[in-house]
Image (cartoon, rainbow, N blue to C red):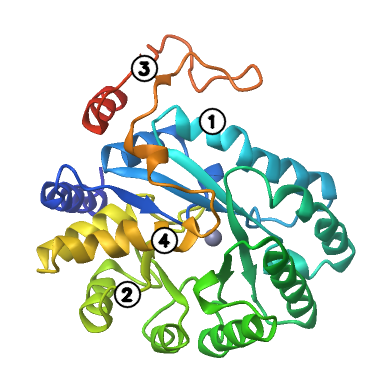
Amino acid sequence: MTSAANLCRQTNLILFTMAPEKMMFIDPHIHMTSRTTDDYARMQEAGIVAIIEPSFWLGQPRTEIGSFKDYFSSLLGWERFRASQFGIKHYCTIGLNSKEANNEALAEQVMELLPLFVLKEGVVGVGEIGYDDQTAAEDKYYRLQLDLAKEVGLPVQIHTPHRDKKAGTIRSMKVAMEHGIKPHMVIVDHNNEETVKDTLDGGFWAAFTIYPNSKMGNERMVEIVKQYGTERIIVNSSADWGVSDPLSVPKTASLMLERGIPAEDVRMVCYQNALDAFGQSGQMNESDWLQPANVDQRDKFQDNSVLRGGQTPVVGEFKTRNELKENIVK
Ligand SMILES: [Zn+2]
């Protein structure tokens, strides 16, 4: 193990010893389709009870409408099943991401597909949508999807650009308002110190992505909460195929506690606010996970299980979350 990995491991151990056993977390932005079952087990161990997987691009552009259809179907099918095998509730948001909005011929077809998916069970918003390079095509499909969200009464999950972030974030909010979307129905993602004030002042939800090395670090997140409080602030990992950490939410929670932020405030930004924001869809309720579901890893989804040869499946009716955790993480 490299010394950096070793240090990382030690830090994780220290952080986890700080986390209260009974604390529950929601990660409202994570791309599990790029992650492994090991991640699901570690997330269960760390207290993550529910996650939201936004539709995004896959690292390389799709060339056929069928790829979008299968991707959306996998978020509603296989990923939800896979999460359930580790006792985690999986929800998703459905949308055309900004990067691929620039392929207009394909974008037109995706727009026809979206109404077939947004009203399915477990879809808690239209997302992640917004701007990347802030092109005319991105603007066009962002606006069309805002209209769709308004029509079906779902929250909007906005991806804000990495370049020219402040202007792009302000533009995203302004355009949402132009389309008659109420700020309380909009979760503005990937905020930082430059954008948080405008987002909160506008009445929007301000989500923060905690990456290990870039964007917001969890030290910076602690300072944001100290400065702005907890109202409408949400922490997520946005973990995907790149360098990212599916345990960002519980780790940030631990650091907040260590730095003296009250447990109730930590609960708001790492659990309750995400539930309140996306719960407006009517598709996500605390009762979905308070009573742990039975787990039977012998179950199959369309003939596939998460098990590999020689593995002993976890099977059981668990009365408490701790009992579930102990069995999933052996
Ligand atoms: Zn994302």
Kindly indicate whether the residue at mark 2 contacts the one at mark 1 (C-beta within 8 angstroms): no
Residue 47 vertical placement versus 37 (above, below): below
Mark 4 or mark 1: whose residue is earlier in sequence = 1
Question: Could you say which quadrant of the image residue 132 lies in?
Answer: bottom right
Identify the residue position indicated by label 2 in the image. 231
Mark 3 or mark 1: whose residue is earlier in sequence = 1
The residue positioned farthest toward the top in the image shown: 310
Mark 4 or mark 2: whose residue is earlier in sequence = 2
Question: Could you say which quadrant of the image residue 124 lies in?
Answer: bottom right
> Nearest the camera: 191 or 26?
26
Kindly indicate whether the residue at mark 3 contacts the one at mark 2 (C-beta within 8 angstroms): no
Q: Secondary structure at mark 4?
A: helix
Mark 1 or mark 2: whose residue is earlier in sequence = 1
CA gap, disc 3 to disc 1?
14 Å
Residue at the (14%, 48%) spot, across then down: 20
Q: Nearer the viewer, mark 1 or mark 2?
A: 2
Q: How far across and down, in percent of the image, does residue 122 sit?
A: 57, 44
Ligand 1 quadrant assignment: bottom right
Q: Secondary structure at mark 3?
A: loop
| Amino acid type, label 1 | Phe
Q: Which mark is residue 276?
A: 4
The residue positioned farthest toward the right in the image shown: 105
CA gap, disc 3 to disc 4?
32 Å
CA gap, disc 4 to disc 2?
11 Å
Q: Secondary structure at mark 2?
A: loop
Identify the residue position indicated by label 3 in the image. 314
Identify the residue position indicated by label 1 in the image. 81
Kindly indicate whether the residue at mark 4 contacts the one at mark 3 (C-beta within 8 angstroms): no
